Image: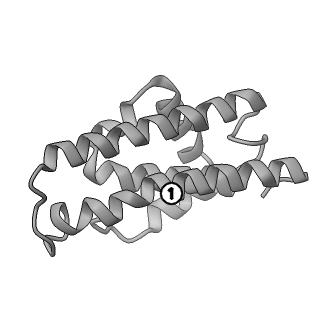
Amino acid sequence: MGKTLWEETLNDLIVECCAETFGVIGKKIFPWKVFKVAPTPENPEKVLEDIYQELVKTLAYVQSVAEAQGTKHLVCDEVTLADVWLLFSLQHAEVAFPQIMSLNPWVEEFMSRITSDERIKDYLSKRPKTVV
């Protein structure tokens, strides 16, 4: 969570932003697109585009928060909950939006940096493969 109250606050901010925005994918896309347990909406392209645009806005906001810190990771120089949450949010989003990982250089750099952390790398190498 970080070492200061401010770092804890930034962690909360990023986690809540990701949970709210990326969580919509699991509610509004996965049931019909991935799991096939709900009917496809009448306007699937619009649903996908609207949600994608919200993801883009959220990522721009998270990027602005991270860049304002001027640290190695999102809120400080150590990996925190915010980094892990964003990593798995992006991987979650990639199922519906494969292009999300190459949205911009910042996302690409974030993914490279976080997945090169030895603890994350170890976990990812052992994590069971799933659809989402």
Q: Tell me, yes or no, if residue 118 can be seen here.
A: no
Q: Tell me, yes or no, if residue 37 can be seen here.
A: yes
Q: Residue 99, image x and y in percent? A: 30, 36
Q: Residue 75, relative to residue 15: is it above or below?
A: above
Which amino acid does the dot numbered 1 rest on? Glu
Q: Residue furthest front?
A: 42
Q: Name the image quarter holding residue 113.
A: top right
Report the front residue among 53 and 82: 53
Q: Residue at x 47, y 35 (%)?
A: 57
For label 1, the SS is helix
Left/right of residue 112 with respect to residue 78 in the rendered view: left
Q: Residue furthest bottom?
A: 37
Q: Residue at x 53, y 46 (%)?
A: 115
Q: Residue 1, relative to residue 46: is it above or below?
A: below
Q: Residue 84, relative to residue 45: is it above or below?
A: below
Report the front residue among 125 and 21: 21
Q: Name the image quarter holding residue 42.
A: bottom left
Q: Residue 14, relative to residue 107: is it above or below?
A: below
Left/right of residue 98 with respect to residue 89 in the rendered view: left
Q: Residue at x 68, y 35 (%)?
A: 65
Q: Residue 40, image x and y in percent? A: 10, 61
Left/right of residue 9 with respect to residue 64 in the rendered view: right
In the rendered image, which quarter contains the N terminus?
A: bottom right
In the rendered image, which quarter contains the C terminus?
A: bottom left
Left/right of residue 118 with respect to residue 4 in the rendered view: left
Density class for disc 1 (Cα within 10 Å; few <14, some 14-19, many ≥20) is few
- The residue wearing badge 1 is 20
Q: Residue at x 38, y 71 (%)?
A: 128
Q: Residue 52, image x and y in percent? A: 33, 41
